[in-house]
Image (spheres, helix red, strand yellow):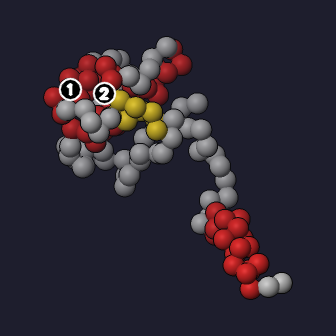
């Protein structure tokens, strides 16, 4: 095998090997969808959407209170991420959506961080 052939094959080999090296042997989270705030939405609109969502029965807004796992980072956007996802997971199978007047969007990247776990329900 020539040196030029090895240069061509090495990147392909790495693509096959790297996912296994990372320890990600299961694809349990493939296709999971989370609802988060759109970064372009002004804080006052996010705050209004948070207020509305927290008024809906079953939406977990306690986790974004001071001294709770999802309080930090203490930003309107981060709090909206958690609340929007709580609403979406609770109501998506009953006709609920991730719209919030254009303030939210779907992601397949789990937004959980530190001790703040974002729920996913199939």
Please, is residue 87 above or below residue 26 in the view?
Answer: above
Residue 5: % across, % down:
76, 78
| In this picture, residue 102 sits left or right of residue 42 | right
Please, is residue 96 above or below residue 62 in the view?
Answer: above
Which residue is under mark 2? 103
Circles 2 and 1: CB distance less than 8 Å? yes
Q: Residues within 10 Å of mark 2 (few under 14, many from 20)?
A: many
Residue at 49% in and 14% down: 95
Q: Residues within 10 Å of mark 1 (few under 14, many from 20)?
A: some
Residue 76: % across, % down:
21, 38
Residue at 74% in and 85% down: 3
Quadrant in which the C terminus appears: top right
Residue 37: % across, % down:
32, 34
Residue at 74% in and 73% down: 9
Instruction: Kindly state the secondary structure of the residue where label 1 is placed.
Output: helix
| In this picture, residue 75 sits left or right of residue 102 | left
Instruction: Kindly state the secondary structure of the residue where label 2 is placed.
Output: loop
Residue at 66% in and 65% down: 15
């Amino acid at each position: 095998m020539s040196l030029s052939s090895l240069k061509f094959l090495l990147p392909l080999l790495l693509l096959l090997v790297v996912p296994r090296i990372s320890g990600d042997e299961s694809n349990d989270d493939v296709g999971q969808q989370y609802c988060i705030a759109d970064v372009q939405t002004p804080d006052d609109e996010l705050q209004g959407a948070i207020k509305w969502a927290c008024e809906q029965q079953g939406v977990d807004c306690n986790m974004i209170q001071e001294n709770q796992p999802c309080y930090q980072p203490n930003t309107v956007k981060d709090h909206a991420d958690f609340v929007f996802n709580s609403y979406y997971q609770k109501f998506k199978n009953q006709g609920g959506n991730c719209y919030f007047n254009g303030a939210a969007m779907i992601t397949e990247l789990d937004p959980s961080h530190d001790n703040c776990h974002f729920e996913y329900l199939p």
